[in-house]
Amino acid sequence: MRITVDIDEGILSDLVVMMGETKKSPAVAKAVTEFYKRAKAREFGKKLREGYFDYPTVNEEIEKYDK
């Protein structure tokens, strides 16, 4: 999807380098995707800490399937 946003040129230049890209659009797309993934991971971690999930298995059972 195409959108138009105003981003400071200095920040955008730094972003291109940070994302390891040579063009602006792929750098912005990669940065947005990375931001989204990290936000979802934080959300999942918060739910784990709050006891949102109830897993009846114990650590030994999990490790058995991990091999």
Image: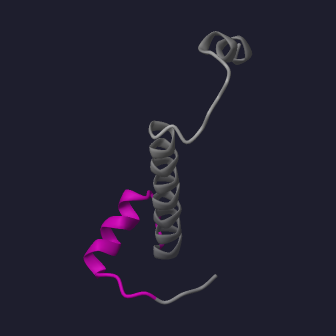
Picture residue at 62% right of the left edge, 33% below the top: 54
Picture residue at 65% right of the left edge, 13% below the top: 63
Q: Where is residue 4 in the image (x, y as percent from the top left)?
A: 49, 90
Q: Which of 6 and 45 is in front in this view?
A: 45
Q: In which quarter of the image is the C terminus?
A: top right
Residue 45 position (above or below residue 1): above
- Reply yes or no: does residue 53 show up in magenta: no
Q: Where is residue 38 in the image (x, y as percent from the top left)?
A: 46, 52
Picture residue at 63% right of the left edge, 15% below the top: 58
Q: Quadrant of the N terminus?
A: bottom right
Residue 15 placement: quadrant? bottom left
Residue 36 position (above or below residue 42): below
Picture residue at 49% right of the left edge, 66% below the top: 32
Residue 9 position (above or below residue 22): below
Residue 60 placement: quadrant? top right
Q: Position of residue 42 (x, y in %)?
A: 45, 49
The magenta span reads 5-23
Going by the image, does 64 lie left or right of 30? Answer: right
